[in-house]
Amino acid sequence: MINYEDEQNLIEGLKNNQAAAFDYVYRQYYKMTAQHVGTNRGTKDDAQDVFQEALIVLVKNLRQPDFKLSAKVSTYLFAVSKKYWLYKLRGNKDSAVEIENLNTDHLIEDGDDLLGENDYDVKHSIIGEVFHQMKEDCKELLTQYYFNKSALGEIAKKMGWSDDFVKVKKRRCMDALKTLVQQHNSYQLLIN
Amino acid sequence: MENLNEKIHDYIDDLLPETERQAFELALKTDAKLAQEVRLYQHLIKGMDVATDNDLRQTIGSAQARLAAENFFTDDVETVEKPQQEAIVRKLNVEKTALIRKLSAYQWAAAASVLLLIAAGLWFLKPNKDALFNDTYTVYFQPETKQLNDVYDEITSPGFATDKVRNESLKNALDAYQAKNYSPAKALFQKHLTAYPLDFDAQFYQAQTLMNLKETQNAAVLLENLAEKTENRWQKDAQWYLALNYLTMPEKREVALNLLKNIAADATSSYRAKAVEMLDKLSN
């Protein structure tokens, strides 16, 4: 039985996809995020989404060879969760009144202190969220090309397209993703 | 402008010949707008990387599912029906105890009738599972239209239409489908599939047509094929619609629930939120 109270064990567990490490993180640290989101106009589902995205940012970074975690797992997760939720709130015009009651500078600083320039950041998580809203064939094409490193000709064959079409399609899909991101309410926050 | 866009794409994909790459990088140093555009595309790729880490999302999804099963995420809110049922059960137990203590043999018969009536009342309070599953199908079934334009685009774009006869035949069937003329659409897709039995686009929209005609058994046969094959773009859509179809078939409900659980754990599926919501409703 691995003792995840030991921070190093927990980090190794998360890096190595150990289910028990993920359970531990939820049991120990989720409530804090849920409480923060709940008291700032979020629902239970919002809290789960926010925590999940923060956990993805954390684990993706932990798996980067050069990444050094400069805070406790709990502090990092809470900081990223707060930053992520702030982006979401700012993107939601209905929440304008509640935003005034938040100490937003403090929230932004929390996250920025912990996230380096080349790290996976909240902005990438939001781009990821937009990516999920794309049409299935675009998601499939871009995933195959950029992450499975499949050749365009190979993708064309799989999808039943011509070689000429797949190249144009890939460009259209990337441009469509760019447009969707630019239309996102938090776009200005993302690019600055 | 189109050329520049193409060049940006080739640059981020590392497809520019060396001399062109060097010239482009020189331009990046002096053209802030161009540099910002390239940075945005690079962020997009990194963002997609976060989104497509399927193993990680699967692990997190499983952790959430395990904890949800323990009611870790649920608030302590009881439904209206549950306290009502519990109150009746409590009343039943009190009455039963009192009856055991006090009633004569003659009175036992009358008491048994009372118990039967109360039990019958409880049975009626139980939700009707068949109705629940059928209603869920009705509420959640929405014909797929998001990708229809893409299919049209592919079969009508000049230069990309590789098989004109196939495209014309598919277009006729799709036109009928889009106009919601489902009976003619069914016949046209059938004719098309006789000539092109492996056309996944036609199989998918024929399944959609059959679902609109409430022919769920026939639709399921086509969707089972599409849901299994990884090399077609409809796989995830097919899994979702297949789960919906199975809900209407009492013998397939367990399979439907398992399919929905898989979709709910698949962070890359655009049907994930709906699957989670549906499972939640069906479990109450």
Image (cartoon, rainbow, N blue to C red):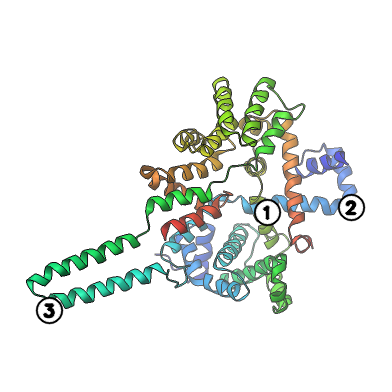
Question: Can you give x and y, in whole percent of width and height, for residue B242 in the image?
Answer: 48, 41
Give the residue number, with chain letter if any, for mark 2: B29
Q: Secondary structure at mark 3?
A: helix
Give the residue number, with chain letter if any, for mark 3: B102
Looking at the rendered image, the quarter that the N terminus of chain A falls into is bottom left
Question: Can you give x and y, in whole percent of width and height, for residue B47 in the image?
Answer: 68, 54
Label 1 crowd (10 A; few <14 / some 14-19 / many >=20): many
Q: Badge 2 sits on which subunit?
A: B
Q: Amino acid type of disc 2? A: Lys
Looking at the rendered image, the quarter that the C terminus of chain A falls into is bottom right
**For the residues carrying marks 2 and 1, which lies nearer the camera in this image?**
1
Where, by quadrant of the figure, is residue B149 drawn? Answer: top right
Q: Amino acid type of disc 3? A: Lys
Q: Badge 1 sits on which subunit?
A: A
Give the residue number, with chain letter if any, for mark 1: A130
Residue A57 visible in this rendered orientation of the protein: yes
**For the residues carrying marks 2 and 3, which lies nearer the camera in this image?**
3
The residue depicted at 54 percent of the width and 25 percent of the height is B190
Q: Badge 3 sits on which subunit?
A: B
Disc with the residue nearer the chain's start (2 vs 3): 2
Residue furthest right as drawn: B30
Q: Quick check: do tags 1 and 3 share a chain?
A: no
